[in-house]
Image: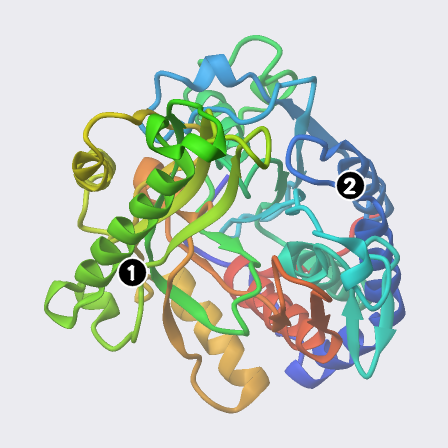
Amino acid sequence: MTTNSLPSRKPLASADIAQAVQALEPYMVDSLDQLVRAASPSGAETPAAMVAEELMLGLGLASERIVLQARALEHLPLYSPACCADGGRYNLLAIHAGGHGGRSVLFNGHLDVVPPGPEEMWRRPPYMPVVEDGWLYGRGAGDMKGGIVCALAAFKALRALGVQPAGQVGFNWVLEEECTGNGTLASIVALRAATTGAATGAMTGMLARSRLGAFDAVLIPEPMGEQMIDAQVGVFWMQLTLTGRPAHAAMMSQGADPIAAGIAIIAGLRELEAEWNRPENRHPSYREHPHPLNFNFGRIEGGEWTSSVPCQCRLDVRIGFYPDMAVDDAKAAVAARVHAALAPLGGGVQVEIRYQGFHAPGCSFDLDQPALQVLAAAHQQVHGSPVARVATTATTDARHFRLMLDSPVTCYGPEARDIHGIDEAVSLASMSRVATTFALFLQQWCGTEPVRG
């Protein structure tokens, strides 16, 4: 439970905490190595969940498995249409209960990763991590298994110094952040139900019996380069299936080419993207950003035979939009531009628009709330300078906590490079600084007490 007063105890010196974290570098490298080796693309996260479960057991933290049941979430405004079968997949929630009051915090992070692309393009196989020049390489090392390890190392460092957080600390490692966000949504539903005493069924399990209180703050250790986010864009995914009229290539005029129609749609959406990015159209949080919104054509498939006008073409598109735009309004504007691009083609190509995957509104975050001011102060202790605030051009699971619970929340995590790309890597020095910042935050926000037993 949460109280407004912190346990009275002389705080540990920041230098001692930094030294304790530094001593854990082998632990951090080994833990991250295990997580990266456990390949966990969206829809197949269980190998990484099993590793994370063992890592938390090593810290004396037993995990609750929150099994995803997408149909139980479909009625919620923040639900995104599922991309993957439930398949018995689960989040992991571990709770350090604390013993003498103190304020609480939840660390929330995702275990799923995006596909690595052609493995021959990598310097090393993507799921065989290697450390070079202070960076650990591998798919998911930066986004965001490195941040998960930072949170665990912060907790472990305090324990190594003979203390532990006096307030409740949660570790919630989720699935499907990279495509829907429904993993975090499932955990929030379980937490909210437990708080109100309404939890029943397999989704919540013994969580319902624990009668957890609400967390006072949420930190998401996404790879933000040791910056705090104060806004994020909205994102939705759309799938366009274009159906034309096939013909022999020697008689192309008798056909209707859906691939050519797809090219016209791409051009039309690029025009809309440019319009939304004009300075006068930008959300205030993105006034200084050169190109805050991105339309990504992530996948294209089409055609059946080289000498035939194609029957079909499929485009998978990711659309970014501003925090002050409703998802349905953004979808309508994009759909209108799709139909406008097809109009000059005379109706020979038909389009079916489906929405599967992200249906995520944007939002802003109040970084002046007490918990986030404590995080900013901890960062300044480590760096000697104020933390930068950034409006991210991506979506994160922070939206669920902000829009569903109105919790104090931000993303803050280590420096990474080439996330979603080739030779993804995370800085080990940055991980050490982030873990130190988190440990200082735990001391200052949750208070500390002697390790029991």
Q: As drawn, which residue projects farthest toward the front? A: 250
Residue depicted at x 44% and y 38%: 315
Place of residue 18 in the rendered image (x, y in percent of width and height, measured from the top left)? 71, 80
Mark 1 Cα within 10 Å, few/some/many (few <14, many 20+)? some
Q: As drawn, which residue projects farthest toward the bottom? A: 384
The CA distance from mark 2 to mark 1 is 32 Å
2 or 1: tag closer to the N-terminus:
2
The amino acid type, in three-letter code, at marker 2 is Ala
Q: Please indicate whether residue 428 sits to the left or right of residue 371 in the image.
A: right
Please name whichever residue, 245 or 270, is drawn nearer the observer in this view of the structure: 245
Q: Helix or strand or loop: what does disc 2 sit on? A: helix
Please name whichever residue, 237 or 373, is drawn nearer the observer in this view of the structure: 237
Place of residue 69 in the rendered image (x, y in percent of width and height, measured from the top left)? 56, 16
The label on residue 48 is 2
Residue 243 location, quadrant: top left
The correct choice, above or below, for 358 with respect to 18 in the image is above
Residue 357 appearing in the image: no
Mark 1, residue position: 366
Residue depicted at x 62% and y 19%: 86
Please name whichever residue, 66 or 130, is drawn nearer the observer in this view of the structure: 130
The amino acid type, in three-letter code, at marker 1 is Asp
The label on residue 161 is none
